Image (cartoon, rainbow, N blue to C red):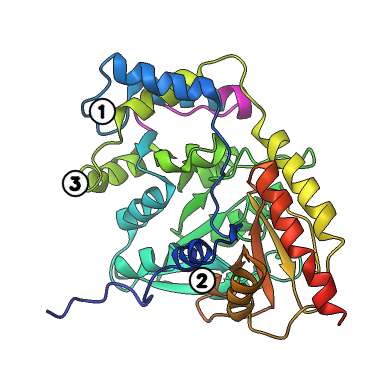
Amino acid sequence: MQFPGKHSTTGNSIFTVMSVLAAENNAINLSQGFPDFPIDSQLARFLYDGAIQNYNQYAPMSGLPLLRQAISTDFQIRYAIDADPAHEITITPGATYGIHVALASVLQKGDEVIVLEPAYDSYIPAIEANGAKSICVPLESPDFHVDWSRVRKAITSRTKAIIINSPHNPTGTIWQRSDWEELAAAIRDTRIVIVSDEVYEQVVFDHMEHISVLHHQELRERSFAVFSFGKVFNNTGWKVGYVIAPPSYTDAFRHIHQYIGFSVNTPSQYSIGTYLNMPEKPDVSALLQEKRDWFLSHLAQLPFTIHQKSSGSYFQLVGYNGISELSDTEFAIWLTKEIGVAAIPVSPFYKARKDDKLVRFCFAKSEDTLREAIRRLSILAVITHR
């Protein structure tokens, strides 16, 4: 049987490859972006309550009303953003699903989508699976800012969408209001749709502010904004996300969604909705900034190069030129097998596999995990100076 190739990517994703390699070598897994510490016990209790109270059958296709209303209230409190729970909020089985369905809602064969690289590896397969072509525009290292002249040059009559990601995976950068203004100016006279990946919106450090596409009224009217509870409440295995979009965009999104995922597991929706309605919850940014600061302070004593500290997300990029001349993928494999710590090479975040000799560490881990990782990495100082 010859199966049709829906996209150009082959084999398993780098996240799967490195996590499997970490398990095979008993390595500390700082590669894949998932926490290894417990979720808030109250959130877990609400999940139990949901099952006991018989929230066990299909939820409505758009999402449990309790959860959609809780999201609407939460956005009003935190961001002063109004989102209609009935016509603008859709619950999804994770954010990656939400991104794929948003693209499926608007793309046709021959369309083009601008992707700012390095980029999360699901974007290009989702674009290609929907018959469109990715047009990759590199962010400018070492601070990974947007070169708006290159974005403007990438826009053609076939450009249907652009994907934005802030806080950014893998670089940890965040967009400022000026970036959104530049985007608005660049696409103002076009019909380009924005898919805004904001899964780390509550994981922002150093008193910085997350600016959503929803804050910009002009852009909001042509955007799908995609979010994830997994990254906010450290429960990535629950696979619950949501998409906020204008009513006409939401209708198009749900037209696709109802025939693929249809609905998301109901006890999790009940749990998260009830949890969101609590007046006080742990500060996820403070928790993860403490981990970032501790991890960075110890990485600084090792022969890695830290071009800039992460402003948001679970991740920190480091250079390793002072340690090895291997490619980033070879170095990540060597680090896993020989040092016992798994990281993600950055080249797979580029369509052309651009290698800047950078790897990504996930610091959203328990104190014991981070301490053991640093203990193992400390041998690099000895190896480097032999």
Residue bearing mark 1: 59
**Residue 267 pos. (x, y %):** 33, 26
Q: Nearer the viewer, mark 3 or mark 2?
A: 3
- Please report whichever mark, 1 or 3, sits nearer to the chain's N-terminal start: 1
Tell me the chief SS of the magenta region: loop
Q: Residue at x 55, y 26 (%)?
A: 40
Q: Nearer the viewer, residue 372 or 306?
A: 372
Helix, strand or loop at label 1? It is loop
Relative horizontal placement of residue 73, taking residue 28 as reference (left or right):
left
Would you call the spot at circle 2 few (<14 residues within 10 Å), some (14-19), or many (20 or more)? many
Residue bearing mark 3: 259
- The disc placed on residue 155 is 2
- What residue span does the magenta drawing correspond to? 76-88
Residue kind at label 1, given as amino acid type: Ala
Residue kind at label 2, given as amino acid type: Ile
Up-down relation of residue 349 to residue 352 (above or below): above
The answer to whether the residues at label 1 and label 3 have Cβ atoms under 8 Å apart is no
Q: Residue at x 62, y 37 (%)?
A: 202
Q: Nearer the viewer, residue 248 or 50?
A: 50
Question: Any magenta on residue 39?
Answer: no
Relative horizontal placement of residue 242, taking residue 80 as reference (left or right):
left
- Residue 221 seen in render: no
Residue kind at label 3, given as amino acid type: Tyr
Q: Residue at x 36, y 55 (%)?
A: 100
